[in-house]
Image (cartoon, rainbow, N blue to C red):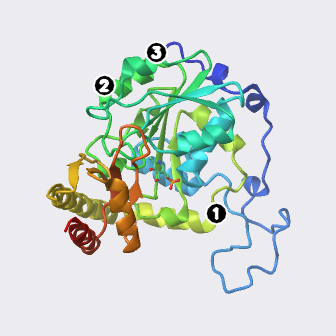
């Protein structure tokens, strides 16, 4: 238990005072509905989903299903437009523009910093350990300033692919008196347990997940934030009234109902990840392929920029990550289908000649 944590001290004063917008569909979803200025004649095409009606502003069914799936209560679940909405809302709730700070551990997912820049929040960066891309816990705690509100940890980390040691995460949750955000976008591809159900135990823990990766539903934009009830309540107050549309909610529910297929697919991707790692490792132009617990591999090349450009010319698109600290000459490659991976390897072989 983090004894020095005080939620009310962390929340921005204007957010504490905020009276949220009260949407019509919060009160009534049925009856003779003449309350929300919807179009009484309906959508201009045949539609059995009542698309002329606003969606449920609280996403009750979806949040209940997610809660059951991850072993938490619906009150601990927030659903947003991708993980990006969760990140944005956390800045809006906790960070005063021009005054507060956050901590990140590069190389990591770029959105934490972009969102900080949008909100005029300073970012302090503590690089991961160059040997094994693990967290340098003491250095992170040393970098905490009085107005450091949030610490972003990404596990499995993008772009390095590794998970962070449980003991390191645990110490940070216990010793940092701000909000610790664990981004678990790739958790289902890893052998680590999710931290999602620990949000009840740790009041300063926030966990982000998404249906964009393991569920293969990046197109519907559905991100999940798990947190203690008071934090979820603040997120519900600050979000746009109808942030999740009906089509997204329906497809997300369908995705969750097909969890077995998701697991089956993840096993296939993990098998393919191993195969691709072995094949890449055999190429002379590849110096190292890092261990990955995600659906991508980070590999160090002798001349990454050139490889990236040559592949792009062949319409094979991967990500150049050489500009990130500790990632010199590195390329990040999403694990494709067996056929796509074969094409990639043969293209790389032809470059090597
Ligand atoms: C670590 C991490 N978090 C979040 C996201 C984005 O998730 P979403 O599609 O839910 O916004 C990504 C996407 O690449 C990611 O790598």
Name the secondary structure under disc 3: helix
Q: Quadrant of residue 113?
A: top right
Ligand 1 within 8 Å, label 2 CB: no
Which numbered marker is on residue 245? 1
Q: CA distance from mark 2 to mark 3?
A: 18 Å
Q: Is residue 112 left or right of residue 349?
A: right
Q: Quadrant of the N terminus?
A: top left
Confirm whether residue 67 shows in the render.
yes
Q: Position of residue 115 (x, y in %)?
A: 61, 42
**Mark in front: 3 vs 1:** 3
Which numbered marker is on residue 142? 3
Q: Earlier in the sequence, mark 3 or mark 1?
A: 3
Q: Quadrant of the C terminus?
A: bottom left
Name the secondary structure under disc 2: helix
Classify mark 1: residues with Cα within 10 Å, few (<14), some (14-19) or many (20+).
Answer: some
Q: Quadrant of residue 91?
A: top right
The residue depicted at 66 percent of the width and 58 percent of the height is 56
Q: What residue is shown with label 2?
A: 167
């Amino acid at each position: 238990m983090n004894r020095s944590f005080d939620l009310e001290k962390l929340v921005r004063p204007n957010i504490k005072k905020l009276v949220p917008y009260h949407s019509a569909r919060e009160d009534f979803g049925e009856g003779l509905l003449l309350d929300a200025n919807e179009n009484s004649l309906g959508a201009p095409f045949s539609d059995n989903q009542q698309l002329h009606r606003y969606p449920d502003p609280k996403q009750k069914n979806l949040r209940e299903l997610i809660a059951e799936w991850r072993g938490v209560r619906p009150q601990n679940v927030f659903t947003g437009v991708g993980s990006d909405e969760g990140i944005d809302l956390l800045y809006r709730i906790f960070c005063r523009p021009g005054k507060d700070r956050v901590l990140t551990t590069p190389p990591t997912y770029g959105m934490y910093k972009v969102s900080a820049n949008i909100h005029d929040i300073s970012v302090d960066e503590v690089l991961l350990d160059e040997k094994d891309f693990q967290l340098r816990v003491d250095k992170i705690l040393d970098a905490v300033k009085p107005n450091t509100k949030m610490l972003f940890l990404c596990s499995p980390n993008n772009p390095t692919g590794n998970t962070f040691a449980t003991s390191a995460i645990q110490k940070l949750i216990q010793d940092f008196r701000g909000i610790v955000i664990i981004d678990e976008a790739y958790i289902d591809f890893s052998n680590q347990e999710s931290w999602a159900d620990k949000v009840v135990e740790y009041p300063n823990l926030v966990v982000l997940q998404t249906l964009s990766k393991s569920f293969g539903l990046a197109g519907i934009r559905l991100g999940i934030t798990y947190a203690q009830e008071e934090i979820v309540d603040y997120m519900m107050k600050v979000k746009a009234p109808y942030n999740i549309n009906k089509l997204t909610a329906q497809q997300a529910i369908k995705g969750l109902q097909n969890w077995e297929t998701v697991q089956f697919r993840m096993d296939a991707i993990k098998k393919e990840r191993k195969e691709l790692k072995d094949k890449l490792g055999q190429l002379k132009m590849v110096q190292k392929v890092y261990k990955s617990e995600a659906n991508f591999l980070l590999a160090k090349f002798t001349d990454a920029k050139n490889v990236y450009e040559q592949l792009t010319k062949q319409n094979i698109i991967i990500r150049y990550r050489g500009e990130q600290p500790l990632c010199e000459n590195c390329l990040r490659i999403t694990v494709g289908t067996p056929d796509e991976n074969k094409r990639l390897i043969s293209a790389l072989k032809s470059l090597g000649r």
